[in-house]
Amino acid sequence: METILVVNTGSSSVKFTLFFSADLQVAASGLVERIGLEGTRLIYRRPGRETIQHLAVIADIGNAIANILPLLTDSRTGVIQSREEIRAIGHRVVHGGEFITQPALIDDRIKKIIQTCYDLAPLHNPPNMEGIMACEKGFPGIPQVAIFDTAFHATIPPQAYLYALPLPLCKELKIRKYGFHGTSHCYVSRKAAECIGRSPSELRLITCHLGNGCSITAVSGGRSVDTSMGFTPLEGTPMGTRCGDIDPAIIFYLMRQRGLDAEQLDILLNWESGLLGLAGTGSSDVRDIITAMQAGNQQAETALRVFTYRIKKYIGAYISALGGVDAVVFTAGIGENSPLIREWICEGLSELGIRLDIHRNQAMNGCLGEIQDTKSRVRLLIVPTNEEAEIAIQTRNLIRI
């Protein structure tokens, strides 16, 4: 039976999912984490069967990829008989810059473009490329497809993607809004349309991908027209450890007052700020911060209020940009699983047609479905994201399996 393998490589991890290409049902999935570190662990799952997990000695991404194939084809643990049953491999690649706006069959030109974007996504594109090269070695002759996080946002118009810097400088250094989480926004906007029973081409949606990283996207007729993340994932709402939008002059102020250099500022804004920096609980996890708030921690509550207020502002701005909205969609770890966060985001938006049903909000937590009040003019939906399935869909469509 033909299958599609989806691979998502990080700096110290490789996630993989094998789909049956006919119906995109999951045949197997897994994770190799802490690659090159002490305590490297391999986790392998098959629907309806016991999960296999064990410690392993895996030095690099290539070694991790080499450990995946035997699991898939082994007579005891496997779900396919040979690598020939893998029809294509779909890779998540974070940044395609201005060059890539569609799924792409990987060849030397695409590899060069991925490498050209290393400076724009130094934590993501290099390990993405390592995964591609390892799969070429481990699965020779099997077509590989790159699905870019930035591609869904390639339809954003100039008035939304340009920064008010000297235009020659922007063009020379490729400074513009790129947007991220595109695979997730693409998937949930289509699923939301299915849930509502209308074509994506008819709808104006605001999709809220809320996890450790957060982004809000305005989707009109199935196309991204604006998104909160920008040149990098640092722009936008506050996140787990990222500050989101700030006055740029704060950076100069910190340089003068604290003597911080570029690397120290990068660490401060990307890894020490956001909910972690505001809540003071030692955790960036919303669940921990809610627990602290419920125990009487006022600072934790303030952090959550800042978080939800800024998301609310983006929703209001995108209603204006879209000229109205048919539905607001919540997805990813927080968006799907935190009734409190959804409730606070929707508070005070009744004049914009947004009314949350408190009971449905609780009852539908983590599930696909609508959570608006009967008087709400705007649909409110929880849509669990599935980026791996979206990568498989786009890979299948390109290869025409």
Image (cartoon, rainbow, N blue to C red):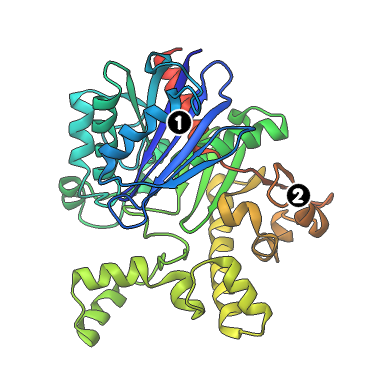
Q: Name the residue under label 1.
A: 391
x and y, in percent, of residue 272 in the image: 37, 72
Proximity of marks 1 and 2: CB atoms separated by less than 8 Å: no
Q: Which of 321 and 97 is in front in this view?
A: 97
Residue 268 appears in the picture as rendered: yes
Question: Please, is residue 361 above or below residue 400 in the view?
Answer: below
Marked residue nearer the N-terminal end (1 or 2): 2
| Location of residue 110 by image quarter | top left
Please tell me whether mark 1 sits on a helix, a strand or a loop: helix
- The local crowd at label 2, few if under 14, some if 14 to 19, many if 20 or more residues have their Cα within 10 Å, is some
x and y, in percent, of residue 95 in the image: 31, 42
Q: Which of 265 and 70 is in front in this view?
A: 70
Amino acid on which the number 1 mark rests in the picture: Ile
Residue at 55% across, 61% down: 311
| Location of residue 190 by image quarter | top right
Amino acid on which the number 2 mark rests in the picture: Met
Residue at 53% across, 66% down: 285
Residue at 22% across, 43% down: 117
Please tell me whether mark 2 sits on a helix, a strand or a loop: loop
Could you tell whether 330 is left or right of 5 in the image? right
Question: Please, is residue 236 above or below residue 100 in the view?
Answer: below
Q: Mark 2 points at which residue?
A: 364
Could you tell whether 372 is left or right of 87 in the image? right
x and y, in percent, of residue 61 in the image: 28, 41
As measured in the structure, the alpha-carbon distance from the residue carrying label 1 to the one carrying label 2 is 26 Å
Q: Which of 55 and 237 is in front in this view?
A: 55
What's the mark number on residue 382? none
Residue 180 appears in the picture as rendered: no
Question: Please, is residue 94 above or below residue 249 in the view?
Answer: above
Residue at 52% across, 56% down: 211
